[in-house]
Amino acid sequence: MADTIAHRGPDGYGLWTSEDGLITLAHRRLAIVDLSAAGHQPMRSHSGRFELVFNGEIYNHISLRNELPAVAWRGHSDTETLLAGFDHWGVEETLRRTVGMFAVALWDLKLRQLTLTRDRMGEKPLYYGSVGHSLVFASELKAIRAFPGFAGSIDTDAVSLFLRYGYVPSPYSIYKGIRKLPPGTLVQFTSPTANAVPLAYWSLKEAVERGQRDRLECSDDEAIDSVETCLSEAVALQKVADVPLGAFLSGGVDSSTIVALMQARSTSRVKTFSIGFDDDSLNEAEHAKAVADHLGTEHTELYVSGRQALDLVPRMPAVYCEPFADSSQLPTVLVSQIARGHVTVALSGDAGDELYGGYTRYGTVAKEWASITRLPRPLRQPAGLAASAVGVAFGSASFGLGEFPVFVSGKGDGAALVWERARRLGEKLQMDSPEELYRFHMSLIAFPDRYTVQASDPISPLNARSDWPVQTLLDERMMFLDQISYLPDDILTKVDRAAMSVSLETRVPMLDHRVVEQAWRLPMHLKRRGNVTKWVLRQVLYRHVPSALVDRPKQGFAVPLAAWLRGPLREWAEHLLNPLTIRKQGLLNPDEVQRLWRDQISGRWERMYPLWNVLMLQAWLAENPAACQSAAITRVDADVVV
């Protein structure tokens, strides 16, 4: 199992089995802090009570040591500090005192109890579940697949969630009986077959509600000062390492802010990394270089050909180990490869959009809901049904659109676009809440049941309303939903797997929980002002970088999917979408998949994003043929809950 994740830790290997044979812990080490043998894992606490394996970094571990009773420290690793905290304060109190990212497995030799826990915002992954009469857990699914007797039964409802979002949201995984531990929780087992429930040691919901009660009331300048101070402190903590360290730099607001704060506190030039593409519409390298030149960083950029990116496509199922369809996974792997040639740790600017209101969808959903509610509620349902019926009738009859209310790029046959928009308007008019409209906008395939065979969406964070904070503004509710699902399960998953596939550790200063909690104290006028998103974050950046270098429309980390699917990826895609193969697998409706493919290759209609979801599922199934056995494909049990 440990060998399958050697890429996460190429610098060392450790194994420990309890005397009674009840538990075995294995660890692969990427040495970052204390490169000596004193940092080796699994590690025993000074008291002899705890044995631990740990992935991640505790950034404030030096200050924690100063609060602990004097012990004969073996070295200066954060692992040893964490164990001393468990000895002195107990597990939950130690976790609450930490500032860091982590996945931990802790064995209590006294109580014969296993604790699994994960950091507050979900930077580090942790899967767990039952295989026969054994409890298994690991940083990646590929390790669990290596356990003897693992059947790999596909959770068909997780397939439905994947088709909708392009990722499998927590607590689900693609496999029945294997779950992701939700961020900010711990789960404890005294028996390998116990039905243990994760408990929160930190709650984003509570952080949001505290922020509402304790809004920051100050001038604009004071707010900017406060945000800069908080972010600067987080950056300073995350720069601590015993190995070379740098940062990703796209030239956008978020990464430029992190790099600017790094360079402001550094006596040497910060190492920064970016990639560029020959396609000008997708290339941000020139913007990144301009920011790097202004800040004086030691900048490395590499222009990547389409062929280099395409060569990565077949590797994606192995890198991500369950279906994952954020196409920016490709440039993320490439920039990680470049950075790993120079450093072992890279800071990123992720989470700026979620914390400071950067996504345009927040404004779009609010405007659409305001328009929808102008029509009296009793009239919305019949009007919506009528608009949908017209869109279906004319779209299907004239253009073969079929049952595909999916992502619309605005390209394609003009008349078809009209009917599709009528269809989508009808669907929106039938919605009962703005959160349902938000979920529609987040869905790359809005009705996955039309693609799947015997599958439906289970309860997930995006529809578990009882778990949401109360009395928030619509914008804030959408930001909260992004932070509990899209951020950990898409953005952070994408970066962690891409970087760790080349043994690169990534750190996200904006996810220091104190930064998160401060962001929730900020009123919305400090986040979005008129048409300006991330207003307060931009003001921090403007103190270091001229606005002209960073003020431009949000570009994203994109690849030319549409052109690739009609060109160099066409043969690969057609092989994966073979109707006979799909029918034999028994997961998807081959007729609907073929209709989706025909729409794309005809050039009449862009279906690239929903199609990429289907292709990434098929590519993953091709890499895991045992999962396709019809006997192994079963529905999720009703007792799986959030």
Image: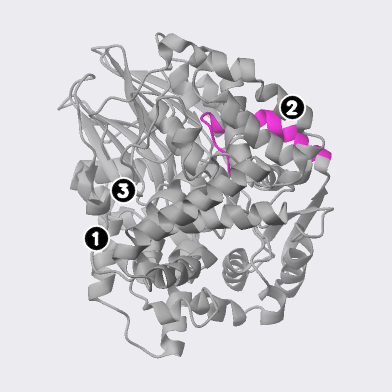
Tell me how far mark 2 sits from mark 3, CA to CA.
40 Å
Up-down relation of residue 561 to residue 196 (above or below): below
Which residue carries the number 3 mark?
A: 184
Up-down relation of residue 131 to residue 608 (above or below): above
For the point 27% across and 31% down, which residue is it? 640
**Region rendered in magenta:** 307-326
Which residue carries the number 2 mark?
A: 572
**Nearer to me, 323 or 98:** 323
Q: Nearer the viewer, mark 1 or mark 2?
A: 2
Q: Nearer the viewer, mark 3 or mark 1?
A: 1
Q: Count neighbours of disc 2 (C-alpha within 10 A) and say few if under 14, some if 14 to 19, many if 20 or more.
A: some
Quadrant for the C terminus, please: top left
On screen, residue 8 versus residue 328, left or right, reads left
Tell me how far mark 3 sits from mark 1, CA to CA.
12 Å
Q: Count neighbours of disc 1 (C-alpha within 10 A) and say few if under 14, some if 14 to 19, many if 20 or more.
A: some
For the point 58% across and 33% down, which residue is it? 614
Query: At label 3, which amino acid type do we have?
Result: Gly
**Nearer to me, 497 or 363:** 363
First of labels 2, 3 by sequence position: 3
On screen, residue 319 versus residue 361, left or right, reads right
Tell me how far mark 1 sits from mark 2, CA to CA.
47 Å
Which residue carries the number 1 mark?
A: 206
Tally the marks.
Answer: 3
SS for callout 1 = helix
First of labels 3, 1 by sequence position: 3
Disc 1, disc 2: CB below 8 Å? no
